[in-house]
Each structure stands twice: as C-alpha cells, then as structure tokens.
Amino acid sequence: MTAFTNNLLVAGGAGFIGSTFVAKCVARGNNVIVLDALTYAGHKANLEWIKQQGAGSWKLVKGDIADHNLVLELFKQHSIGSVVNFAAESHVDNSISGPRLFIDTNITGTFQMLEACREYWGGLAATQKNDFRMLQISTDEVYGSLGPTGKFSEESPMKPNSPYSASKAAADHLARAWYETYGLPVIVTHCTNNYGPRQFPEKLIPHMIHCALSGKKLPVYGDGKNVRDWIHVEDHCDGVLLALNKGKPGQAYDFGGDAEVENIALVTQLCASLDRKRPKKQGSYSDQISFVTDRLGHDRRYAIDDSKSQKELGFKRNYRFEQGLEATIDWYLANDAWCKTVMEKAA
C-alpha cells in the first residue's frame, strides 16, 4: 500500500455511520482526514473513542463538502488517494418540513465534491489516477416503496417518494454521469436502515429508547405495519470497505441486513427488552406506545437483494439482528448521558 492509497478523505465522518467507517480505516492503518460540518448530527465525540493505532490516524477538519476550494486544498495537502462521501442530510421528517437544506447538501454538495474530485484526479500521475476512487454513499430509499413481496437490487428503477430520497437519487445520477462523461472512478453504494451505537436519537431505535427512558410517548406512524430491513452499522461499513477496495468504477453495490421487521413489532420488541433490562416501577414501556398520524409519502416496505455484493465483493453479515439489537440497547442504556447531550445540542 503506497502513502497515496493509504490516505483517505471521509466526508461526514463525524456522524453515526461515517465515524464507524473511520474507526475501521484507522484500525487497518489508513490516515483519514475527516471533513464534517458538525451540524446537529455530527459530533467530535463520535470520533474521540477511536484510537490512533500504529500507522493509522484521523484528523478532523470542520467544513462543508460544498466548499470546493477547501475540499481541493485538502486533497492536495494530504495527497488523498480515495474519497468516501457519507455527508448528507438524512432525516425524512426534516426533509418534508424543510427540503431546501437537503437540496443544498445532498445535491449541490455532492456536485461540488464531484467537481473537486475531477479537478484533483485530472492532475494526478497515471498510476495514482488509476488507483483513485470516490465512493458516494446512498440509500435504499431512492428505489421507492415495495409491495408485500420482492426486493430491491442494483437494477431497480429509482422512484423516490420524499424530498430526502429524491435528493439522494439526484446525487446518484450525478455520480453516474461524472463516471460516464468524465471517466471519474465513482462507485455508489446503497444500504437498508442502519442501527448500532452512537446513532443520533432522531432515528427510530435510539429515539424510542430515549423516549421510553424519559417517560414520553413512543410515537408510531400510521398503523405501524411499515416494514424496514435493518443492517448493523458494522456490517454496512464492512461492505463500504469492500466496495472501496474491490468495487468497479461506474458500478453500484447494495447492502442489506436480511432482517425485515414491521415498525410496531420492532417498537414492541424494544419495550420488552427494556422491561427486562431496566424495568419501570409500574407497568410496561409498551404502555407508552402511541399511534400518530402517518408521515406524508411514507414508504410501505424496503428490502434489498445484496447477492451482487456477496458474489463480486465477498460481502457477508456478521450480526444477527436479534443479537445486534440487544447489544445496541445495552449500549444506549450504558450511555444515556450521551443521548441527552446530543439532544441538547440539537435543541
């Protein structure tokens, strides 16, 4: 591994998924420049647990992926060999109430990142140019909504139904176009719902845990029968690493959890686990479940067929959902102060 290929820029690396990926890269000896705007869901605390191991290191730079000059300067200053773009606004509810920020970050930001990559990549020596990669991290939500059967794959048409998913689909199209038009070696990955430690408490699992422990209602949209496929963040990041090292430019790779669960069943399962691990003085946490008006444009079901990633990249899952969920609940029970701190920052 040359010094060039060992140096990575990870945009959005102070977030939940990005920081998990940074930890994996540092552990394998990469030098990682983390570029993060440190908005409400990005925190330096998400990185501070990562040990600087051997040759591996990380450095945090506060900044926006839409800042073309900053990104280009980081590329040149640190001889970046690959870029992984986790940076995104990702909460669907927020995209419905305020879509502008999603357009600015997920579309314009990705465009600026692609252009900075193209300018930098175009000036590299032939060997370095051949080794360079840009990974655009996307979501299964770009594919829209499934019926009761079937799964999405890399060949599924994009049919986004929310401002969030539409902005991510637009970014996917830009990434493909920059490969087809300019030859920029871009790879796109899609995944199902992530779960695990240090996830911002706006997302379903940590949100329900936080609300339960705070004595608040547990809001479940509609009839609660919307189905999501869950992948542990460690498995997802293993897949991203495989795509970075083995993926073919111009291709897309999907990663699923093979763990489909109705929302109401998941919330009920969380309550039962909390009843065992931290019982209330009276009653069950399930007494706090409250059905609320359904989200606008709420997709009914997601599921991913990741056989391409298994076959071409060697992707495999190491976490069974039931075990991973119990470990995740244990983490939040031991780190409730972390949840309160990040929620206060967002308020």
Image (spheres, rainbow, N blue to C red):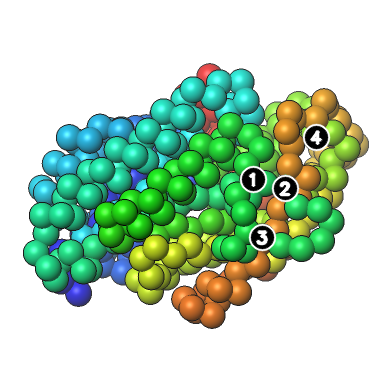
Tag 1–tag 2 contact (CB < 8 Å) = yes
Rendered image: mark on residue 145: 2
User: Height in image: 298 above or below 96?
Assistant: below
Image quadrant where one finds the N terminus = bottom left
Camera-nearest label, 1 or 2: 1
**Residue 146 visible at all:** yes
Q: Secondary structure at mark 3?
A: loop
Tag 4–tag 1 contact (CB < 8 Å) = no
For disc 4, the marked residue is 220
> Disc 1 marks which amino acid?
Lys
Residue found at x 44% / y 57%: 188
Residue 61 rendering spot, x and y as whole percentages: 24, 39
Which class describes the residues within 10 Å of circle 1: few (<14), some (14-19), or many (20+)? some
Residue 119 rendering spot, x and y as whole percentages: 17, 47
> Disc 3 marks which amino acid?
Phe
Residue found at x 82% / y 61%: 149
Residue found at x 34% / y 45%: 11
337 left or right, relative to 93: left
